[in-house]
Image: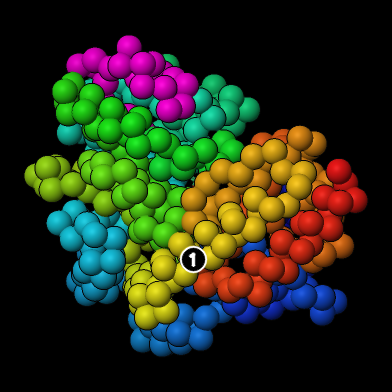
Amino acid sequence: MNPFNVYPLYDIEPVKAQGSYLWDKKGDQYLDLYGGHAVISVGHSHPYYVEALTRQLSQIGFYSNSVQIPLQKELGEKLGALSGYPDYSLFLVNSGAEANENALKLASFYNGRKKVIAFKAAFHGRTSGAVAVTDNPSIVAPINDNSHVTFIPFNDVEALKANMSEEICAVIVEGIQGVGGIHVTSTEFLQAARQLCDQFGSVLILDSVQCGYGRTGKFFSHQFTGVEPDLITTAKGMGNGFPIGSVLISPKFHAKFGMLGTTFGGNHLACAAAVAVLDIMKNENLIENAEKQGAYLFEQLKGISGIKELRGRGLMIGIEFEQPVDKIRDTLLFEHKIFCGYAGKHTLRLLPSLAIGQAESDQFLEALDQVLAVNA
Ligand code: PMP
């Protein structure tokens, strides 16, 4: 049986990872500024994380949600405290798509409605409900009905006003569009969305799967705007590589949870991973570090010629070029041994671990400078 991978594969086989570095089987060292797509939040194979998972597995790795799992409570308390949402409830799942799927279901159970407003270039996942609000026709199968979804231009307050009504179940928006090219959702837009959702009884869902979990220098990127969403979804950095996601649920939903469920969500090992991530973030001030290193990178990038536009916040950085990005990305990877991502044809995407230091930032800046000098 041949496993298939939907993403293009590099002929690189990492066999070891530590902090912000990977080593392949030839022994070559790579700087990881992509974190396997925003997943590695506290660094690869952090000793505290390894110890917590090993210890948990030697005690109890899994039993179903039919029993008491005190680790869920510990996770809820720590996540509530660090994120600033102690009054929200926590529903634990296994991925970003599953988190969005459940957020949409909750919204629909809550107000009994079906129509959803989503945004051009949005990405929310590949399962039926999540792909229906994702603006990428190539991954929507005929069975994935999205006739209930209206895609409006991103950050367009007038378009949102024109499309809101008492039929709208939910507005789902990323705090910063990731796959769509690193576009920050504006404060003005989110405030308008909040006001219109209140006015029409619709639910505001903030997809924080990629931009959340401290990456921007606040726990959630929408916390720069003062807007409080009804539902917040997380995944990726939550488990630092162990699959776990969640829906943070505003107290106004409290009476309406009975219809959610999952076999694996909130299992012992996943919770131990997520608790270890939060402990490390707190003990090592990683959210502050994300802000500091992000500011440093943005400042230094401004001084590099050949960049068309810089977008993002903290350690979620989009660097747009006039020319297609593939050659720049591949040269960084194969000649300079630096993993970066891309978002669209012209934008390089950085999603490093929040523990990145200035030496790693400088290594990247120097390499990019050289690559652009040759490829300008
Ligand atoms: N939402 C956003 C904003 C994402 O970037 C992604 C993954 N790229 C998802 C949801 C889906 O997450 P997963 O792949 O864990 O299902």
Residue 241 coordinates in the image, percent (x, y): 52, 66
Residue 139 coordinates in the image, percent (x, y): 59, 31
**Residue at the image point whose x is 54% and y is 30% from the top:** 121
Q: Report whether residue 158 is seen.
A: yes
Residue 168 coordinates in the image, percent (x, y): 26, 21
Residue closest to the eye, 9 or 44: 44
**Residue at the image point whose x is 58% and y is 51% from the top:** 317
Q: Magenta residues? A: 148-172
> Quadrant of the image for the N terminus?
bottom right
Residue closest to the eye, 26 or 341: 341
Q: Quadrant of residue 353?
A: bottom right
* Residue behind mark 1: 292
Q: Is residue 227 left or right of residue 300?
A: left
Q: Is residue 26 left or right of residue 42?
A: right
The disc labelled 1 sits on which kind of residue?
Lys
Residue closest to the eye, 334 or 287: 287
Q: Quadrant of residue 371?
A: bottom right
**Residue at the image point whose x is 24% and y is 73% from the top:** 74
Judge whether 127 appears above or below 235 on screen. Answer: above
